[in-house]
Image (cartoon, rainbow, N blue to C red):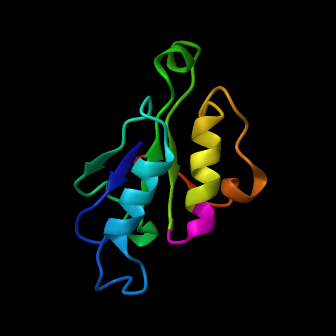
């Protein structure tokens, strides 16, 4: 999973009610060690901050799965749904729950 943490995403001035460091800690704590969380500079969809990208496993990618982009990840509920989906297999393996699908955004340039 890639978590944008640059100009808008993770910005306490833009979203003062969100503890951005705690959000990152919760994701790292909730996902099993098999799932790597990395931070990134701007992913170029600032209007959708906080942006996160869930990457398929190598096996799912070989079967044609693509990364799934999420925007406005600002609540514990969206985080929890994302974690459950990733733990269930993520892109190309598990179907995105309907509520989580509301947070899916197009990748830049698509």
Residue at left offset 67%, top offset 55%:
100
Residue in the foreground of this view, choosing between 107 and 32: 32
Residue most extreme to the right = 98
Residue 74 in the image, given as x and y percentages of width and height: 50, 71
In this rendering, the count of numbered labels is: 0
Name the side, left or right, on which 59 lies relative to 22.
Answer: right
Q: Magenta span covers which residues? A: 74-78
Name the side, left or right, on which 70 lies relative to 19.
Answer: right
Residue at left offset 46%, top offset 18%:
58
Residue at left offset 37%, top offset 76%:
19
Residue 28 in the image, given as x and y percentages of width and height: 40, 49
Name the side, left or right, on which 68 lies relative to 37.
Answer: right
Is most of the magenta stretch helix, strand or loop?
helix
Q: Quadrant of residue 41?
A: bottom left
- In this view of the protein, can residue 110 be seen by the observer? no
Q: Quick one: quadrant of the N terminus?
A: top left
Residue 65 in the image, given as x and y percentages of width and height: 57, 25
Name the side, left or right, on which 94 lies relative to 91.
Answer: right
Residue in the foreground of this view, choosing between 26 and 109: 26
- In this view of the protein, can residue 58 be seen by the observer? yes
Residue in the foreground of this view, choosing between 58 and 67: 58
Residue 83 in the image, given as x and y percentages of width and height: 57, 48
Residue in the foreground of this view, choosing between 40 and 87: 87
Q: Is residue 93 above or below residue 106?
A: above
Give yes or no for residue 15 being in the magenta stretch.
no
């Amino acid at each position: 999973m890639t978590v944008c943490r640059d100009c808008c995403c993770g910005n306490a001035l833009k979203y003062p009610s969100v503890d951005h460091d705690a959000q990152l800690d919760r994701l790292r704590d909730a996902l099993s060690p098999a799932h790597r969380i990395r931070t990134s500079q701007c992913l170029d969809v600032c209007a959708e901050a906080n942006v996160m990208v869930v990457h398929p496993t190598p096996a799912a990618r070989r079967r044609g799965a693509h990364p799934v982009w999420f925007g406005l990840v600002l609540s514990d509920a969206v985080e929890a749904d994302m974690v459950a989906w990733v733990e269930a297999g993520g892109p190309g393996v598990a179907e995105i729950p309907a509520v989580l699908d509301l947070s899916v955004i197009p990748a830049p340039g698509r």
